[in-house]
Structure formats: C-alpha cells, structure tokens
Amino acid sequence: MDAAVEALADRYVLSWKPNPAMLADRFDPDRVRAYVRDTLERTRGCRLEIVLKDTFTVQGDARRFVEWTRIAREEIERVSG
C-alpha cells in the first residue's frame, strides 16, 4: 500500500478493495472502523476509491453492508475534515 501511495500520489486513482471477510465472519464495527481508518490515513493525499467486492455471504444480515458503508463515510469525513 505504501509503495502504491508514493507512486500514484494524487495523479491516479488508487482502487482499494477491502478484505470482504469483515462482512462474512463475525461483524465487528470497531475492527471495521480501525481497518478503514488505517487505510484512509495511509492513503491521505491520494485519489482513493473503495470497492467492496466478493461479498458472497453476510450470514443473512444485509444490514452489515449499511453499517460498513456508514462507518466508511464517517471515517472519510473525519479524515477529510
């Protein structure tokens, strides 16, 4: 990640595909927040897109997508001020 950030800076879009296991296994909002926050801080100054993919199962709880997205939006707001 760090090498990509350095090479791309704000000239290209960095496409981040988060680990989908955070949605499939035991959903832990604090773990998701820390994971997203770490990535956003490491990619500060980059043009970042977040692509949730390979989400085949959420243990029957589609609200996990809503919660993951809410957390990501909050962290994006926090980072971008």
Image: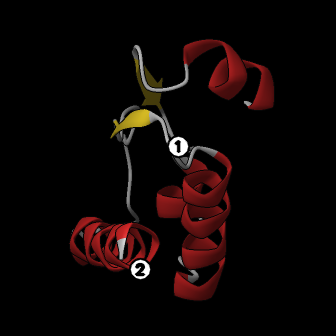
Quick one: which residue is furthest to the right in this view? 3
| Residue 18, image x, y percentages | 53, 43
Q: In the picture, which quadrant includes the N terminus?
A: top right
Q: Nearer the viewer, residue 61 or 37?
A: 37
Earlier-in-chain disc, 2 versus 1: 1
| Residue 71, image x, y percentages | 37, 77
Which residue is denoted by mark 1 in the rendering?
Answer: 18
| Residue type pointed to by label 1 | Pro
Q: Is 18 above or below relative to 65? A: above
| Residue 35, image x, y percentages | 64, 64
Provide the secondary structure element on which disc 2 rests: helix
Where, by quadrant of the figure, is residue 11 drawn? top left
Circle 1 crowding by C-alpha within 10 Å: few under 14, some 14–19, many from 20: some
Provide the secondary structure element on which disc 1 rests: loop
Q: Which mark is residue 37?
A: none
Which residue is denoted by mark 2 in the rendering?
Answer: 78
| Residue type pointed to by label 2 | Arg
Residue at horizontal 78 percent and vertical 20 percent from the top: 3
Residue 33 visible at all: yes
Mark in front: 2 vs 1 = 2
How is this picture coloured? secondary structure
Residue at horizontal 56 percent and vertical 71 percent from the top: 32
Is residue 2 toward the left or the right of residue 66 in the image?
A: right
Q: Is 28 above or below relative to 80? A: below
As measured in the structure, the alpha-carbon distance from the residue carrying label 2 to the one carrying label 1 is 19 Å
Is residue 64 toward the left or the right of residue 32 in the image?
A: left
| Residue 40, image x, y percentages | 54, 56
Quick one: which residue is furthest to the bottom in this view? 30
